[in-house]
Image (spheres, coloured by chain):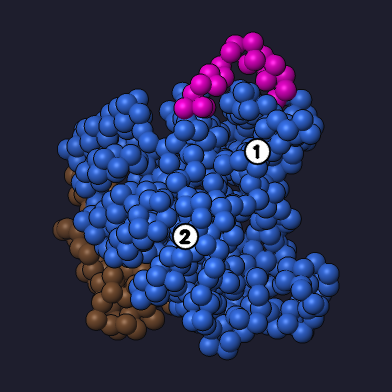
């Protein structure tokens, strides 16, 4: 994985020192909150419902064991013993003290991490495929390109005050595991007919109050023009994005209002201009970055055999493990979705254990997924049973990847000052209900996503079943959506009708699941059945 | 009644105006009537509280109850982690929020 050079480390250390001084001046009263707020937000420090919240960037979701240990230490030393992994592959701490924040950033810097650009109207953490470098179906590891984009976008002076926040995802597989088309820019590394690598650009996707699927703006950008084309996309947005209305300020609104063709025309014009300026970093820099992402020393003769005699282990393998490009290896997903648990939360002890297992079984590398789980990407099949036993003992071997219990949920009104309704209790009740009835096992792949407000941090638009919490005259109410997807077949869910209270939404999800079970044909997922039969049978069952 | 709430500047903890200081317990909150703006300006200048504002609440047999669920969750703590609320010994404390 990427290691900081002296420039990276110097920049991050300088930022820690700068923020330490700013924090001291705030506490001493030399800065007002109005003056300090944009400074703390630039360092990922929010003020949430119960305390300050710190969001730490995990570039493209990749962590070493030392970094995971450091995250656990922060949870223990400065927070209340846990952290929350987010849908942007980051981690958040909910109980941070302002006076501790500079020390936390200093601790992060020691393991080459930071919280820079995890808030504010700038380019946020670059996200990617959690199986990058391991997936059998990728054309190349997308992370060197994500890292190049990270370096370009970090402290980019032109893009630190954009009309709104800006999120980029980079993938390199036909199967989209990063919700790429629901980002401001989705970059898909592809190979053209001549066998050359390049990047397809999808621009103007997003969720929030106006969900959009990003249209394809350019099929193939040569990789030695990747940054220049990205800069052109951002420049057009920075110039014409709506700054007068924050609800219309995301690039998706600009692309929608201009039309994809006109936006593309303007980008191409800017791109032609930028090419004359020679802003692209030298290819040698990309080659340097690539050296950090070479394959680990796989054992060439590793056996593909697995002893599946333990049925619980076999079930976990079938559900939570993904084929690897290297014979004898497998990618294992650690579910942070125990039945009745809080999606994405991990205790310090669990983080320490995952760090130890990362070091022991996965070449010192793990990944945070946008579905709020953790992946050990390179596990030798011969080690898999031992790994599973240790996970099982720690309550981390729930076999539910992509099942209805593998719920994405934002922190909701239990923690977030923007939320209108609680997400987590609804997730807990649904996972418990389907575990108790056994229906969860019968349903197969069913992605359920819950947001506590229209900002859609819980990706409800992209859930096969989505739930949106709203405020209805001071009480929590939940809308049900069906038919969303974030994969290669990206689609946006549609609202079924009037909303439900907390218990009602749990029953409504069960009703929708029952319709699927009654109507599905061989091999159909919930999403397939919904697309075949449409909304009406579900509405009939829900509302009569 | 109108009560004042904010977050402690250094710790971020949720606090409530008692008439002379800031308390972690909403039951200590007092009705500020129409003096909210004056108190808020004074207290934020004194750097004892951050991002403070006035909210509606009632006082009933169980004490002070903020009018909106968001403020009740702020007053108690996260309903999904009773151990981290101000009433960790009462697993049913979250019912007060609803």
**Which residue has dot 2 on it?**
A380
Choose the circle earlier in sequence order: 2 or 1. Answer: 1
Question: Which chain can be seen in brown?
Answer: B
Outermost residue to the bottom: A437
Observer-side mark, 2 or 1, equals 2
Residue A80: percent from the left, percent from the top?
26, 62
Residue B1 in sight from this viewpoint: no
> Tag 2's secondary structure?
strand
Question: Which chain can be seen in blue?
Answer: A
Residue A279 in sight from this viewpoint: yes
Dominant secondary structure, magenta: helix
Q: Pick whichever, A314 or B98, lies toward us.
A: A314
**Which residue has dot 1 on it?**
A189
Chain label for disc 1 = A
Residue A369: percent from the left, percent from the top?
50, 55
Q: Is residue A120 left or right of residue A524?
A: left
């Amino acid at each position: 994985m990427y290691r900081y050079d002296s420039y990276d480390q110097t920049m991050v250390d300088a930022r820690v020192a700068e923020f330490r001084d700013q924090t001291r001046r705030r506490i001493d009263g030399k800065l007002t909150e109005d003056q300090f707020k944009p400074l703390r937000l630039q360092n990922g420090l929010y003020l949430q419902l119960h305390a300050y919240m710190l969001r730490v960037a995990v570039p493209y979701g990749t962590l070493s064991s030392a970094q995971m240990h450091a995250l656990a230490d922060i949870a223990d030393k400065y927070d209340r013993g846990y952290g929350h992994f987010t849908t942007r592959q980051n981690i958040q701490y909910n109980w941070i003290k302002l006076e501790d924040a500079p020390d936390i950033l200093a601790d992060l810097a020691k393991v080459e991490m930071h919280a820079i650009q995890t808030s504010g109207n700038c380019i946020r953490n670059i996200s990617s495929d959690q199986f990058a470098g391991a997936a059998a179906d990728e054309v190349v590891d997308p992370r060197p390109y994500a890292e190049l984009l990270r370096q370009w976008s970090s402290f980019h002076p032109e893009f630190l005050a954009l009309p709104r926040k800006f999120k980029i995802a980079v993938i390199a597989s036909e199967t989209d595991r990063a919700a790429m088309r629901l980002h401001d820019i989705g970059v898909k590394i592809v190979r053209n007919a001549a066998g050359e690598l390049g990047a397809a650009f999808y621009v103007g996707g997003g969720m929030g109050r106006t969900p959009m699927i990003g249209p394809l703006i350019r099929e193939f950008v040569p990789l030695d023009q990747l940054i220049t084309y990205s800069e052109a996309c951002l420049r057009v947005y920075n110039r014409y994005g709506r700054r007068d209305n924050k609800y219309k300020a995301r690039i998706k609104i600009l692309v929608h209002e201009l039309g994809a063709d006109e936006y593309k025309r303007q980008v191409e014009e800017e791109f032609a201009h930028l090419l004359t300026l020679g802003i692209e970093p030298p290819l040698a820099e990309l080659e340097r970055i690539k050296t950090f992402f070479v394959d680990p020393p796989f054992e060439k003769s590793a056996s593909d055999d697995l002893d599946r005699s333990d049925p619980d282990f076999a079930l976990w393998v079938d559900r939570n493990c993904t084929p690897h490009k290297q014979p004898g290896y497998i990618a294992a997903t650690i579910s942070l979705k125990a039945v009745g648990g809080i999606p994405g939360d991990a205790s310090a002890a669990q983080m320490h254990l995952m760090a130890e297992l990362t070091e022991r079984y996965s070449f010192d590398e793990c990944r945070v997924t946008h579905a709020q789980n953790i992946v050990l990407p390179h596990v030798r099949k011969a080690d898999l049973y031992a790994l599973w036993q240790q996970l099982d003992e720690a309550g981390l071997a729930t076999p539910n990847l992509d099942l209805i219990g593998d719920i994405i949920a934002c922190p909701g009104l239990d923690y977030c000052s923007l939320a209108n309704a609680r997400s987590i209790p609804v997730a807990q009740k649904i996972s418990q209900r389907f575990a108790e009835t056994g229906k969860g096992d019968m349903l197969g792949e069913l992605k359920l996503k819950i947001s506590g407000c229209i900002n859609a941090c819980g990706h409800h638009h992209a859930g096969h079943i989505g739930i949106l919490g709203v405020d209805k005259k001071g009480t929590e109410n939940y809308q049900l959506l069906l038919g969303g997807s974030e994969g290669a077949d990206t689609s946006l869910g549609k609202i079924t009708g009037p909303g439900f209270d907390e218990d009602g939404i749990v029953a409504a999800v069960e009703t929708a699941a029952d319709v699927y079970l009654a109507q599905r044909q061989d091999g159909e997922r919930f999403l397939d059945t919904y697309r075949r039969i449409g909304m009406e049978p579900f509405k009939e069952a829900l509302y009569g | 009644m109108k009560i004042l709430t904010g977050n402690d500047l250094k710790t971020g903890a949720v606090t409530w105006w008692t008439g002379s200081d800031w308390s972690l317990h909403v039951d200590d909150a007092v009705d500020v009537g129409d003096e909210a703006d004056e108190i808020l300006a004074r207290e934020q200048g004194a750097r004892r509280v951050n991002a403070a504002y006035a909210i509606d609440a009632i006082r009933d047999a169980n004490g002070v109850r903020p009018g909106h669920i968001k403020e009740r969750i702020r007053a108690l703590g996260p309903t999904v982690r009773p151990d981290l609320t101000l009433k960790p010994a009462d697993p049913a404390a979250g019912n007060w929020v609803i």
